Amino acid sequence: QQQVKQSPQSLIVQKGGISIINCAYENTAFDYFPWYQQFPGKGPALLIAIRPDVSEKKEGRFTISFNKSAKQFSLHIMDSQPGDSATYFCAARGYQAGTALIFGKGTTLSVSS
Amino acid sequence: DAGVTQSPTHLIKTRGQQVTLRCSPKSGHDTVSWYQQALGQGPQFIFQYYEEEERQRGNFPDRFSGHQFPNYSSELNVNALLLGDSALYLCASSSTGQGHYEQYFGPGTRLTVT
């Protein structure tokens, strides 16, 4: 069964610290790995995404690290801010057009000031 | 540039009733996917519409059906509502020209079945 396993379930980080969320996948046909940020009562917002031909992608304070051989990828939030407090979802999908996104169960991040 | 819009925002229905949810995709997008998000869980794929046809379907019963209109907007219909259908229903749009990689979500419709 296609699955994406996400950890930890919840995370508390001090303001200015680094938040790290990890995901692992099983299906080697996956070739697109996005991260979504969701605030309470809102829809998920696309944050950053990576394809498996690169090992790292950085956009501002957000970085995805990708390990193809281990079938793992992670989100790093540098200089975490209280406004980053939200639920983060990793996801994966295959290469064919129209393939559904398979989501992890989410990580609730709280950044304390 | 308008993003993905959904209506209504909230809906309360009784078991056994039927419900219709609506979605307008982001400008320039031609494909609509529907997801169900239970409380405390990640979104789960229901189905995807492209060129007014269902192209892919997740593990949901036939009580869940949909439609896509020529202007690319879409409807999700759920018949014979169960208590377990209570969830946030999300619509996501994408573009064939961009390979459907980037999917943008709307704010969702919160459905409560009593």
Image (cartoon, coloured by chain):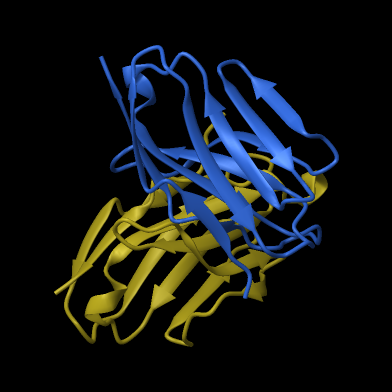
Give the camera-side residue of A71 and A36. A71
Which quadrant: the N terminus of chain B? top right
Residue at the extreme front of the image, as rendered:
A70
Q: In which quarter of the image is residue B40?
A: bottom left
Residue B72 lies, in percent from the top left, at: 62, 56
Would residue B29 be visible to someone looking at this image? no
Residue A48 visible: yes
Percent across and percent down for residue A39 are: 34, 37
- Quadrant assignment, res A28: bottom right
Relative side of B13 to A38, left or right: left
Report whether A49 appears left or right of B87. right
User: How many marks overall?
Assistant: 0
In the image shown, does A65 or B11 lie closer to the viewer? A65
**Relative vertical location of residue B39 with respect to residue B80 in this rendering, above or below:** above
Chain shaded blue: A
Q: Which residue is drawn at 30% across and 80% down?
A: B18
Q: Where is residue A46 in the image (x, y as percent from the top left)?
A: 56, 37
Which sits in the foreground, B28 or A107?
A107
Is residue B83 rendered to the left or right of residue B92?
left
The quadrant of the picture occupied by the C terminus of chain B is bottom left
Residue B96 percent location from the top left of the image: 77, 52
Q: Which residue lies furthest to the left in this view?
A: B114
Q: Which residue is drawn at 79% across and 50% down?
A: A69
Residue at (78% x, 42% y) in the render: A51
Q: In this view, does A79 lie above or below B75?
A: above
The picture's colour for chain B is yellow
Query: Image height check: is A61 above or below B36?
Result: above
